[in-house]
Image: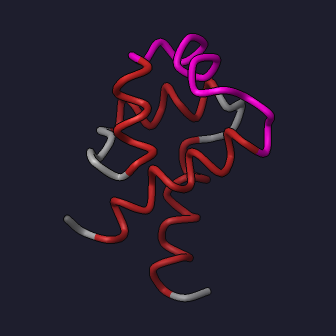
């Protein structure tokens, strides 16, 4: 699994925690199965674009922020 894509789950978890949301709260507002969110955050699965968009909306941030953070992390910025 590509590290940059696996990092997406960790980033989503970090943003969720910064916003003081539980996994169940985010899953509910994003319309994502809580089990899927758990697997994404653990890095067991890579979210597709539709799921990233839903999660970003649930976190009240733009989806491009998730991808920019991944790019920055991978490039060492």
Give the colour scheme shown. secondary structure
Q: Is residue 39 above or below residue 46?
A: above
Q: Total label count?
A: 0
Q: Does the magenta portion include 14? A: no
Query: Where residue 24 sits in the image (x, y, percent)?
Result: 57, 18
Question: Residue 60's quadrant in the figure?
Answer: top right
Q: Does the magenta portion include 20? A: yes
4 and 36: which is toward the camera: 36
Magenta stretch? 18-33
Q: Residue at x 63, y 41 (%)?
A: 62
Query: Where residue 34 sits in the image (x, y, percent)?
Result: 44, 20
Viewport quadrant of the C terminus: bottom right
Query: Where residue 50 sits in the image (x, y, percent)?
Result: 36, 29
Q: Is residue 72 above or below residue 28?
A: below
19 and 65: which is toward the camera: 19
Query: Where residue 36 sits in the image (x, y, percent)?
Result: 34, 27
Q: Is 48 positioned to the left or the right of 73 in the image?
A: left
Q: Is 50 positioned to the left or the right of 63 in the image?
A: left
């Amino acid at each position: 699994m590509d590290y940059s894509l696996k990092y997406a789950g960790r980033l989503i978890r970090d943003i969720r925690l910064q916003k003081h949301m539980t996994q169940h709260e985010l899953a509910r507002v994003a319309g994502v199965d809580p089990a899927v969110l758990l697997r994404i955050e653990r890095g067991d699965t890579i979210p597709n674009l539709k799921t990233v968009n839903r999660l970003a909306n649930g976190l009240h941030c733009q989806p491009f922020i998730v991808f920019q953070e991944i790019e920055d992390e991978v490039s060492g910025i």
